[in-house]
Image: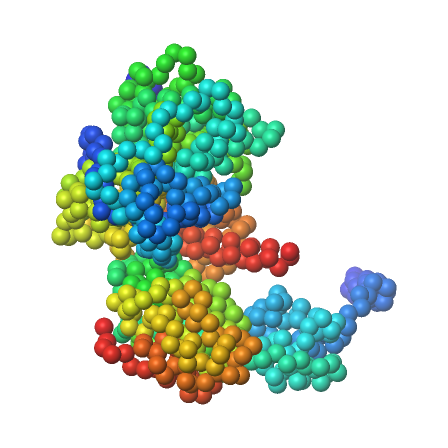
Amino acid sequence: MTATAAAQTFRHGIHPGENKELTAGRLIERMPFPEEVVLPLSQHLGAPSRPIVEVGEKVYRGQIIALADGYVSVPLHASATGRVTAIAKRPHPGGKPQEAIVIACDPTSPQTLYNEGALSWEHLNKNEVLTAIQNGGFVGLGGAAFPTHVKFSIPRGKRVQFFLVNGCECEPYLTTDHRIMLEFGDSILLGIRILQKMLGAEKTIFGVEDNKWDAIRSLREKIPSDLPCDIISLESKYPQGAEKMLITAMLQREVPSGRLPIDVQVVVSNVGTVAGIGDMFAYGQPLIERIVTVTGPGIRKPATLMIPLGTRLRDVIDHCGGLTDDIRQVLLGGPMMGTPQFDLEVPVMKGTSGILCLTQSQAPSRREYPCIRCSACLDACPVFLNPSALGSLARSAKYEQMLAYHIMDCIECGSCSYVCPSNIPLVQRFRVSKGLLRMKQAKEKARTN
Amino acid sequence: MIEGITAIGFLVVLASLLGVILAVANARLKIFEDPRIDKVQEMLPGTNCGACGMPGCRVFAEQAVAGAIQPSQCRVGGPETAAIVAGYLGVDAGDVEKEVARLMCAGGTNVAIQMAEYVGYPTCQSATAVAGGGKGCRYGCLGFGDCKAVCDFDAIVMSPTGLPVIDPDKCTACGACVEICPKKLIELRPLKQRLLVQCKSELAGDGILALCKVACTACGKCVADAPPGLLKMKKNLPVITDELIHLQARDATLRCPTGAITWLNDQTSAVAKKEPDHVV
């Protein structure tokens, strides 16, 4: 790694304590298959998958058990060989129980893949690669779980100059992407080769924060000379992993409000997704397992694990030695944007990047004081909104007026709430306001139609 | 002296000149507006609640005068206002039935368990975003009172067990609480409907009873006991067929093991509820 004078980054943002040392130095471990996997039909944004297996049927690891229901949807694969024991409502991280396929894993099975073997990709055209990605069940593994084939479909008349690979992992505690970059370099590079050709991009650029200098060094050594690929070392800052922030940090291009990265000739993908796609073409494995950081002061043995999808949190936590006695909170995702869970029966899903066990609540019930106009939130907001003004509008339920302050551009990163000295629950109010505004817009649309 | 007279004279001339311009403008640029609109607007409650589907009372008045909307569609005003407006405009008042908001959950803190403590921003909308809010029953009322906060008519108070209690006399069926409830637990029902299913849990079987003592277990006894066709099971809940509401009878509630389906003593009363076997 060559030392640069000042690492690149975006303006504003915050730098919370990283706390990554618990797992950053540990190799990825493979978690043993649990007794039962619970695979919700809705693990991605878009229409839930449609089951094609019946209760009692034997299924094999990697076999498609539910089909994509529409274009913005992906199929679901069995993550373990076993027997379907139920297709019913099961606890879901989102809150309401959702339809899920439950498979009792066969303890005697060798758990080999249903369709093993490399896929040749050199002769495939764009649409064939996209179809293969959809059939592999791929969604963005960074957390949003948006179907990858939709994101990679370039609209007519648009072109891709740069393909950005997101290895920022700016959330504290998480080391999922860090370990992937260290241990799955070859899968990532194969993925890049395929995707770069498919997208027609001039160049692929990795964006990696400088706290992961070992990953940067290891990738630099691996990049073959015939692949137009580069790595940019970015200053460690939150929320750099947000797509629009990353584009600004790396290319100094701003994605206009309400538009997509493709409008500035860029496509961004999480490094885990790229590695997964590489693995699928290398030996035929669809998205049936993922790497999850299990960490925090509340877990006895923190680890970065390769977990079959659908494994319940209880099984994962038991594998890691259990929770400590002073546990206060278990979150899915990082401490900034993750959602607390109160039922350990919920499964690990495609979008689960981490399981964080905290002994002190991240949102203690602190008293809210009036805004003192210190403007700390304005200096933190990465999309240059005015959280102070928005907060007071949200407090008095003036949602329509919030539109004039561009509330819809809020990426809900929580930097404003993090820095607020008066403990005003800003991002919480914005999420509620955005939800209500979206509801109102949908209603108006329905009325005009 | 002379300056004073000049000044007064100038102002008199200026005032009359401007007066003439205004008089001409008033005559030439006049926009005709039906004077009845103002009258009707005065008769309306003036709460601008939007329950009628119009942005406010003024637009309702315009529409009523134009004959595009029936006076009784103003639910807030009730039959009296509708009769006055209809009498003034000489149109039929229409017969839109009086509706009230009813809470379709009976799982207060005395009967339903809380699985986690929610310590964030105390609104139902916000708590729902955090894995459903921590209540054992994922379908149940969280009790932070978003509906109370949004009610313009003070018709909602929170009970000691953390459930909103809606006063049917004050409720105007404006629908604000229906819209805000993140769990969709409040529904507008005709005032005369006395048979209510006070549960929204879509789970079947007795498993739910570990979370809430008054949940519907989807046993189907009420469907069997009710007049044919009145109740139908949909998503593991009995649903009342609106057209057959005149058939409603207390029989359907008698064999309910949990009291999830209830019968109101009279139209205005709160719920006469079977006591649960034991209290959490």
Q: Percent position (x, y) of residue A413?
A: 38, 44
Name the outermost residue toward the top.
Answer: A225
- Viewer-proximal residue, A415 or B90? B90
Q: Quadrant of the C terminus of chain A?
A: bottom right
Does B155 appear above or below A371?
A: below
Which colour assignment does the render follow? rainbow
Does A419 appear above or below A161?
A: below
Q: Quadrant of the N terminus of chain A?
A: top left
Question: Is residue A169 among what the camera can see?
Answer: no
Place residue B144 in its image quadrant: bottom left
Which residue sits at x=49%, y=20%?
A123
Does A200 appear above or below B148?
A: above
Which residue sits at x=58%, y=80%?
B97
Q: Percent position (x, y) of residue A363?
A: 28, 53
Which residue sits at x=56%, y=80%?
B98
B94 sits to left or right of B110: right
A134 sits to left or right of A28: right
Question: How many numbered callouts?
Answer: 0
Which residue sits at x=76%, y=75%?
B35
A19 sits to left or right of B45: left
- Viewer-proximal residue, B71 or A56? A56
- Viewer-proximal residue, A417 or A274? A274
Q: Percent position (x, y) of residue B106?
A: 35, 74
Q: Percent position (x, y) of residue B183?
A: 41, 63
Place residue B259 in its image quadrant: bottom left
B226 sits to left or right of B275: right
- Viewer-proximal residue, A294 or B175? A294
Question: Is residue A58 among what the camera can see?
Answer: yes
